[in-house]
Image (spheres, helix red, strand yellow):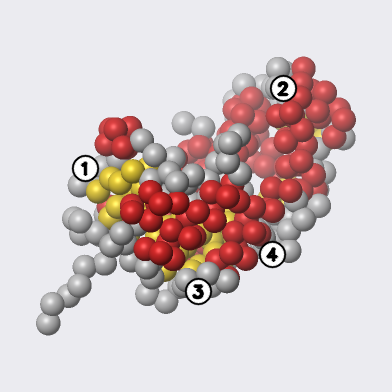
Amino acid sequence: MEVLEMKYAVTGATGKFGRSVINYLVGQLEQGELVALVRNTAKAAQMLPQGVEIRQADYNDEKGLEQALGGIDRLLFISSLPSEEHSRQEQHFNVIEAAKKAGIKFIAYTSFPHADQAQSPLSADHKATEQALATSGLNYSLLRNNWYLENELDLIKGALTGQPFTYSAQNGRVGWALEREYAEGAARVLLSSQPKKIYEFSGQPLTFKELATAVAAVSVHQFEVLALDDNEYKKRLVHQGLPEQVAEVFIMIQTLIRNGELAHPSKDLEEVLGRQLMPLKKAIQEATH
């Protein structure tokens, strides 16, 4: 009996997360089974492994997305970066509509921790996307990713050179893990024959003070650890050259952490990976080299 080939696709495949997914899947799939969906095909051809089929697809072009998804069975839908002209919600709805019309059999979507309950403005587009998937008629899994350790790289690298380690999240906890670990988790769900509906992907929730202790353990320089209020933290960010609007985003993130939105413990990521996550000190060393 003929075995039908399954085709897998990944959106946003030239982003760091997407490239990590592609690099993992290349080792798991046969030639012709993997498709990278990208805006810039020339850029993708230079960045992605040989043998990966590259198709042009733009989150802002529903018709083009539908064409690019032709013949695809299973899709990893990596959440977009919104543009000034197009909202993330609009972009995400385009992907879902295109997937419906293209006959996609399964979507795994990278979402926000406990997006159905989260209150932060950062979660709003993810909540709307989850609701759209729930009413789409598509089979799907929600990959609710906590925070990448790499999100704190500027803070960590500064401390490693002796600069103050500053934050305003108080004792709020974050489930940091390496971005590549989240990416491999997403790839494994995409390949799974019996995926769960919801995965709360996270590392062990830790405070910024605990993160600072781990940074100090691998640093050759001493540094101050400063737990500030939001106003003082914002002043420091602006003084360091950040535009005020960007500093406001930093404050919003510190606020959602302080409010416990990233503090939910879960073993889902370790269970999907089939191993423990990289210990924090080793993860810091990997992320900073």
- Image quarter where the N terminus lies is bottom left
Q: Amino acid at mark 1?
A: Gln
Q: Which residue is mark 1?
A: 50
x, y percentage for residue 173?
Answer: 73, 51
Image coordinates for residue 115, horizontal then vertical, percent:
67, 60
Q: CA distance from mark 2 to mark 4?
A: 31 Å
Mark 2 vs 1, N-terminal side: 1
Q: Give the class, few, some or many, for how many residues have Cα within 10 Å of label 1's Cα (few <14, many ≥20).
A: few
Separation of disc 3 and disc 1 at Cα?
A: 35 Å
Q: Are marks 2 and 1 in contact (CB under 8 Å)?
A: no
In the rendered image, residue 67, in percent from the top left (x then y), is placed at 33, 54
* Res 127 visible: yes
Residue sticking out furthest to the bottom? 1
Residue 243 circle label: 2
- Could you tell me which residue is drawn at 27 percent across and 36 percent down? 45
Q: In this rendering, does residue 176 appear at all?
A: no
Could you tell me which secondary element the residue under label 4 belongs to?
A: loop
Secondary structure beneath disc 2? Answer: loop
Q: Disc 3 designates what residue?
A: 137
- The CA span between labels 2 and 3 is 43 Å
Mark 4 Cα-neighbour bin, 10 Å: few <14, some 14–19, many ≥20: some
Residue depicted at 58% across the width and 64% down the height: 132
Q: Quadrant of residue 99?
A: bottom left
Q: Which mark is residue 116?
A: 4
